[in-house]
Image (cartoon, helix red, strand yellow):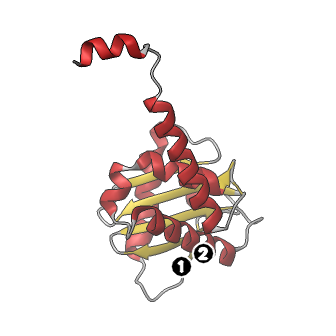
Amino acid sequence: MIQAVMVISTQAKPRLLKFYNFQAPEKHQDLVRSVFQLLSASPDSVSNFVKVDTIFGPGTKMVYKHLATLYFVFVFDSSENELAMLDLIQVFVEILDRCFKNVCELDIVFNFNKLHTILDEMILGGQVIETSSEQVVKSVEEIERLEKQSSTTSFIPKSITERFTR
């Protein structure tokens, strides 16, 4: 089971934190700090797989990918495959790239709702539910279309709104 998904900037700023098992909110900053210390201490030439028993408990592993100014981090238990998690990070980044047209850190900061929607389409309750980037993008576009449609729906009759827009 996936226990956490984190996107952390190279300045140690959390851009996305999603925990699938309960972590007290006051503990989040300590977890981010511990994970970032591990990430920043390891050179680019070493493995992207790290055991994090001391941070998240026994049997947990972490896989990460450093792209541009961001670390994409997945924390999971022994029931998940390490290479599958690395591939899932790649799929997640590809979907972000398709949705934001060459994603950058600012896209993630200012569109956090869309980021959570994408992640929720891929992972539910710590279990991977979709790995097809085409299907996830299609679902996200449909959700956006429905949100736009519902935000343009007005509960005020047109006859009244026309009086005030003249």
Q: What residue lies at 38% left-to-right and 56% top-to-bottom?
A: 108
User: In the drawing, what numbered circle is on residue 86?
Assistant: 2
Q: Is residue 101 left or right of residue 164?
A: right
Q: Which amino acid, by three-letter code, is at mark 1? A: Asn
| Residue nearest the viewer, comparing 138 with 48 | 138
Classify residue 43 by image quadrant: bottom left
Q: What residue lies at 54% left-to-right and 49% top-to-bottom?
A: 117
Give the secondary structure at mark 2.
helix
Q: Residues within 10 Å of mark 2 (few under 14, many from 20)?
A: many
The reply to whether residue 78 is visible in this rendering is yes
Residue under label 1, please give it. 48
Residue 71 placement (x, y as % from top left): 43, 68
| Residue nearest the viewer, comparing 29 with 145 | 145
Q: What residue lies at 57% left-to-right and 60% top-to-bottom?
A: 137
Sequence-first disc among 2 and 1: 1
Q: Are marks 2 and 1 in contact (CB under 8 Å)?
A: yes
- Farthest residue to the right: give it: 79
Residue 158 placement (x, y as % from top left): 40, 17
Classify residue 39 by image quadrant: bottom left
Residue 143 placement (x, y as % from top left): 56, 45
Which quadrant holds the C terminus?
top left
